[in-house]
Image (cartoon, rainbow, N blue to C red):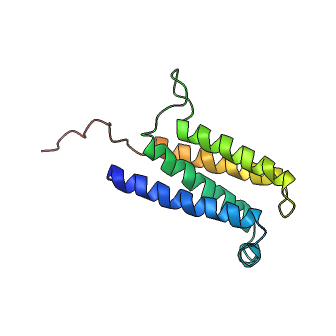
Amino acid sequence: MPRLLVRLAFLLFAAGFVSILVIANRGRADLFWQLVGTVPCGDKLGHLGLVGTLAFLLNLVLDRRRAFRSGNGLMLGSLLVLVFMTLEEASQAFIPCRSFDLVDGLANVVGVFCAEGLLRMLPSRSSPPSPAVD
């Protein structure tokens, strides 16, 4: 996928993601939450999918760069999303129209690790080309 397209996809998704957070923090998402509530575990699946997609796209933008130089550890984008979402989830304890939920935080972590696992399975742009078959 062309680099510009990956960056654009990340920027558009991140803008939508932040919009959802702002709307929720203002207590204006009643219709949205009712829709999510009609799906079994809809809130948790939403956390997993949204946060996982955010981590997936950010890791692509950052060319799957590792957070730490040693070993085959966590990708930088995954670490950044984990820190951001942990702070965001914790901040809900101080916002009157929100509520802190540890299971939401767990769904965020699972989403990030699913994204990271998927990226590790996919070939990177720097992978050597497949040998030609005659």
Residue 42 as seen in the image, left or right of residue 134:
right
Decide: is 86 above or below 11. above
| Image quadrant where one finds the C terminus | top left
Residue found farthest to the left: 134
Provide residue 91's location: percent of width, then percent of height: 79, 49
How many marks the image carries: the answer is: 0
Residue 37 as seen in the image, left or right of residue 13:
right
Residue at position x 28%, y 35% from top? 128
Residue 60 as seen in the image, left or right of residue 48:
left
Provide residue 41's location: percent of width, then percent of height: 75, 66
Residue at position x 68%, y 58% from top? 47
Dividing the picture into quadrants, the one containing residue 131 is top left
Provide residue 39's location: percent of width, then percent of height: 72, 73
Residue at position x 44%, y 58% from top? 9
Residue 50 as seen in the image, left or right of residue 70:
right
Q: Nearer the viewer, residue 123 or 65?
A: 65
Q: Is residue 100 visible?
A: no
Q: Nearer the viewer, residue 87 or 64?
A: 87
Residue at position x 32%, y 37% from top? 127
Residue found farthest to the top: 70
Q: Is residue 4 visible?
A: yes
Dividing the picture into quadrants, the one containing residue 100 is bottom right
Q: Nearer the viewer, residue 26 or 35?
A: 26
Provide residue 94's location: percent of width, then percent of height: 86, 52
Decide: is 11 above or below 83. below
